[in-house]
Image (cartoon, helix red, strand yellow):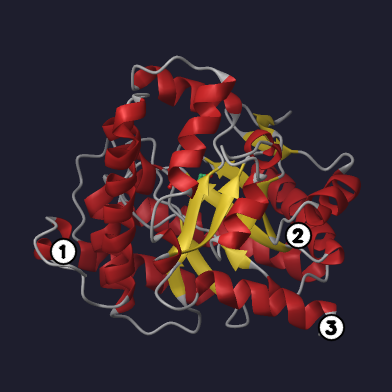
Amino acid sequence: MTRSSELSAVAATLVAGGKGILAADESIGTMNRRLENAGVAPTVEHRRTYRELLATTPGLADGVSGIILCDETFRQSTSDGETFPRSLSVRRILTGVKVDTGAKPLAGAPGETVTEGLDGLRERLAEYRELGAAFAKWRAVLVIGDGKPGFRARQANAHAMARYAALCQEAGIVPIVEPEVLMAGDHSAAACAAATAVTLRDFFAELEDAGVALDGIVLKPNMVVPGEDSGEVATPDQVASATVGTLRTVVPAKVAGVAFLSGGQPAAAASANLAAMQQLATPWPLTFSFGRALVDPALAAWRGDPEQVAAGQRALAHRVRCNSAALQGVYDEAVEDGRVPA
Ligand code: 13P
């Protein structure tokens, strides 16, 4: 297999077959905050145990094609002494790794950020591949309001993203390209659609200029939703038509697949929106790459109690079943309530 056909095969696997991607790659700081909010001491061992709970959930591979880890978890081992990438590979789940080093304030663009992490990236990617990474993630963060996202933030982030994606493909790793337009704010769904469109247009221009093979990437965008403080309510059908309508105008048909982030939506809303999108025609497969909308119920059920590991795993398995049902067009209230098996 040539390197480019290997990349497109891995990208296609990530988005195919009623499966999606589990984002369990919170940075140490973010994970610590989420552990503390759940009443769990923010220790290295708790971060490891929690990720082991997620990764070893029985039947996870039925609805999850890949898991994104942060560098810390990537290098840790599960209780049986296997590294996380090896443990996932035995479970027929691809390992991904977040390789950016976070969003930092962007000079000349007050209130906006640029995602960093390009220094030494070629060498880091070679090591990650050696240790079992099949794909990687880089998240750019764009905000809406007062002329934002501005040209400078879009350009700087798009350029960094394209350099990251080109380096990934050179290393034989599928890049997940995540330009997240945040839900934070009181903007309308129409403003989100406009900001998402202009952002994606800039990102794809840079990806094309950098020679990135679009059939060897997975796009991870936000859904088009009203700002969380807007008071506006959008039904799943409205979210679906705004999101698919926006993406269809700017995302090239060659892209291997689109895997949405959840962005802070309630878990059931994210599943309902995903289900509504499946009803619409798109040139690319659509799936999920949720973090919070998959794992929040699991964290709440576990709360750091070794006796509640199975409860945490059942909570994750339920969310995976709901989202897998959404992909297969069979998600409804009965599936959400756990009354019928999907
Ligand atoms: P959420 O689904 O919680 O937005 O997380 C997805 C993700 O990977 C953010 O980078």
Q: Quadrant of the C terminus?
A: bottom left
Q: Quadrant of residue 237?
A: bottom left
Image location of residue 154, percent across then percent down: 65, 48
Residue carrying label 2:
165
32 lies above or below 170: above
Which labelled disc corresponds to residue 2? 3
Question: Mark 3 Cα within 10 Å, few/some/many (few <14, many 20+)?
Answer: few
Marks 1 and 3, the one that precedes in the sequence:
3
Q: Secondary structure at mark 2?
A: helix
Q: Of residues 252 and 306, which is closer to you in this image?
A: 306
Which labelled disc corresponds to residue 335? 1
Question: Mark 2 Cα within 10 Å, few/some/many (few <14, many 20+)?
Answer: many
Q: Quadrant of residue 231?
A: top left
Q: Quadrant of the N terminus?
A: bottom right
State the CA–CA distance, disc 1 to disc 2: 37 Å
Q: Amino acid at mark 1?
A: Val
Image location of residue 336, percent across then percent down: 16, 58
State the CA–CA distance, disc 1 to disc 3: 42 Å
Marks 2 and 3, the one that precedes in the sequence:
3
Marks 1 and 2, the one that precedes in the sequence:
2
Which labelled disc corresponds to residue 156? none
User: Residue, x 28% and y 69% (percent of image)?
Assistant: 326
Q: Secondary structure at mark 3?
A: loop
Q: Is residue 122 left or right of residue 229?
A: right
User: Residue, x 34% and y 58% (percent of image)?
Assistant: 320
Q: Amino acid at mark 2?
A: Ala
